[in-house]
C-alpha cells in the first residue's frame, strides 16, 4: 500500500449547508467519521472482526483545521495517512479535498484507542492490523504546525 489511501468520496448537498451557505461543521465531522470507518475496515478492523472479538474503537482526540469553504454541489474526497502506530493506539490524518479545485478543504488529526468492549479497557491490536497500519505511516505537515 502507498502511504495515503482514499477513504471517502461524496458530494455536498444543499441540506449539508448552513444559513451562511457553506457546509456546516457537523457534516465535515460526519464525512470524516465515514472516512474513519472505511480506513479501519481497510486495515482489518472490520465490523465482523469487531463484533466477533468483542472489540471497539474510541476516538479520544480530534483536531480539525478548516481551510476552504465547500458549497452545495462540490465533490469531496478524503485521503488518510497514519502518523503513529502504538500497541493500542492509532493516530492518523484525514485530508478532505475538492478534486475539481485541487484544494484542501479541511484536515483532521485523530487519535483512536482499540477497546475490549467487555472489560471496557484499551487492548492491543492484532499483529496483522499493526502491520497494515504501519504500511500507511508517512510524515504529514499539519496546518497548525506550518510557519506563518
Image (cartoon, helix red, strand yellow):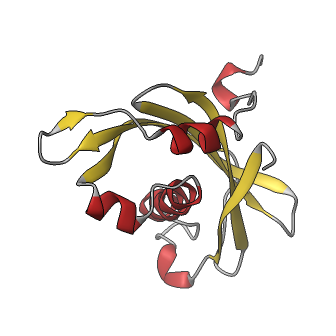
Percent of width and height locating residue 23: 55, 66
147 shown above or below 3: above
Count the numbered circles shown.
0
Judge from the rendering whether residue 113 lies leftward or rightward of residue 6; answer left or right.
Answer: left
Instruction: Tell me which residue sits at (67%, 64%) in the image.
Output: 70
Q: Where is residue 101, by image quadrant?
A: bottom right
| Res 64 visible | no
Percent of width and height locating residue 129: 53, 44
Pick whichever, 14 or 7, lies toward us: 7
Instruction: Tell me which residue sits at (70%, 41%) in the image.
Output: 136
Instruction: Tell me which residue sits at (49%, 25%) in the image.
Output: 86
The residue positioned farthest toward the front in the image shown:
127
Percent of width and height locating residue 91: 52, 33
90 shown above or below 72: above
Judge from the rendering whether residue 146 lies leftward or rightward of residue 85; answer left or right.
Answer: right
8 shown above or below 109: below
Amino acid at each position: 500500500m502507498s502511504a495515503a489511501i482514499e477513504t471517502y468520496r461524496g458530494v455536498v448537498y444543499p441540506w449539508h449547508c448552513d444559513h451562511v451557505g457553506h457546509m456546516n461543521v457537523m457534516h465535515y465531522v460526519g464525512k470524516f467519521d465515514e472516512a474513519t470507518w472505511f480506513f479501519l475496515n481497510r486495515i482489518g478492523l472490520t465490523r465482523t472482526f469487531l463484533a466477533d472479538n468483542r472489540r471497539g474503537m474510541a476516538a479520544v482526540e480530534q483536531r480539525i483545521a478548516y481551510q476552504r469553504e465547500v458549497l452545495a454541489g462540490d465533490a469531496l474526497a478524503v485521503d488518510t495517512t497514519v502518523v503513529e502506530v502504538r500497541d493500542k493506539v492509532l493516530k492518523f490524518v484525514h485530508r478532505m479535498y475538492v478534486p475539481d479545485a485541487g484544494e484542501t478543504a479541511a484536515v483532521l488529526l485523530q487519535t483512536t484507542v482499540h477497546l475490549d468492549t467487555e472489560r471496557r479497557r484499551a487492548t492491543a491490536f492484532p499483529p496483522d492490523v499493526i502491520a497494515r497500519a504501519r504500511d500507511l505511516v508517512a510524515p504529514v505537515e499539519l496546518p497548525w504546525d506550518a510557519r506563518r
